[in-house]
Amino acid sequence: MLGRTDVLDSALVAALRSVHNEIPAGPDYRRLLRESLKHASTVMQLSGQIGERNEAARIRELVQQLGEGQAVLESDAEASGILTRMTRAMLAVNHEETHTRGHYRRSESEFDG
């Protein structure tokens, strides 16, 4: 027996399929889909709120059910690349700050001594 959530999900997927079929598959459609997935991926990676991450995951599931699994994979790869670049930039800044602070400490101790 289907639960209320399953019935709502089925109705939502059916409605989305209907809308999906009405939208021309042109560049604007693909751009909007990619942007939505990029935002969902960002929320899943960076949000501390479980509810927000679950909603983002649900958007991705719905997109996959609409037959756009490749768009989800591309979005994941792009989001992963962005997160990697952000992490590297933060680590580089942290490394530079640590190195700079260490340099100043040595200079100050040398000056005092």
Image (cartoon, rainbow, N blue to C red):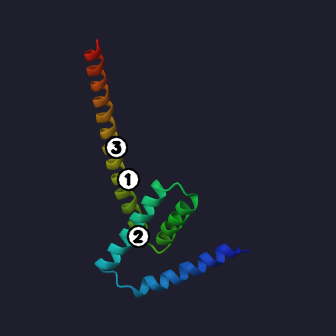
Q: Position of residue 34 (x, y in %)?
A: 36, 69
Question: Compared with residue 99, is residue 83 higher up or lower down, i.e. above or below?
Answer: below
Q: What amino acid type is highlighted by mark number 2?
A: Ser
For marks 3 and 2, the one nearer the N-term is 2
Instruction: Quickly name the residue at label 2.
Output: 36
Question: Compared with residue 2, is residue 103 higher up or lower down, i.e. above or below?
Answer: above
Q: How many angstroms separate mark 1 from mark 3 (CA)?
A: 15 Å
For marks 1 and 3, the one nearer the N-term is 1
User: In the displayed image of the protein, which residue is found farthest to the front?
Assistant: 112
Disc nearest the viewer among 3 and 2: 3
Q: Quadrant of the C terminus?
A: top left
Q: 70 or 105, which lies in front?
A: 105
User: In the displayed image of the protein, which residue is found farthest to the bottom?
Assistant: 22
Q: 109 or 102, which lies in front?
A: 109
Q: What amino acid type is highlighted by mark number 1?
A: Ser
Q: Position of residue 53 (x, y in %)?
A: 53, 60
Image-based side of 1 in relation to 66, left or right: right
Give the numbered dot on residue 90.
3
Q: Secondary structure at mark 3?
A: helix
Q: What amino acid type is highlighted by mark number 3?
A: Met
Q: 79 or 16, which lies in front?
A: 79
Q: Residue at x 25, y 17 (%)?
A: 111
Question: Compared with residue 40, is residue 22 higher up or lower down, i.e. above or below?
Answer: below
Instruction: Quickly name the residue at label 1.
Output: 80
Q: How many angstroms separate mark 1 from mark 2 (CA)?
A: 15 Å
Disc nearest the viewer among 1 and 3: 3
For disc 1, the neighbor class at 10 Å (few under 14, some 14 to 19, many from 20) is some
Image-based side of 106 in relation to 44, left or right: left
For marks 1 and 2, the one nearer the N-term is 2
Image-based side of 6 in relation to 40, left or right: right
Q: Secondary structure at mark 2?
A: helix
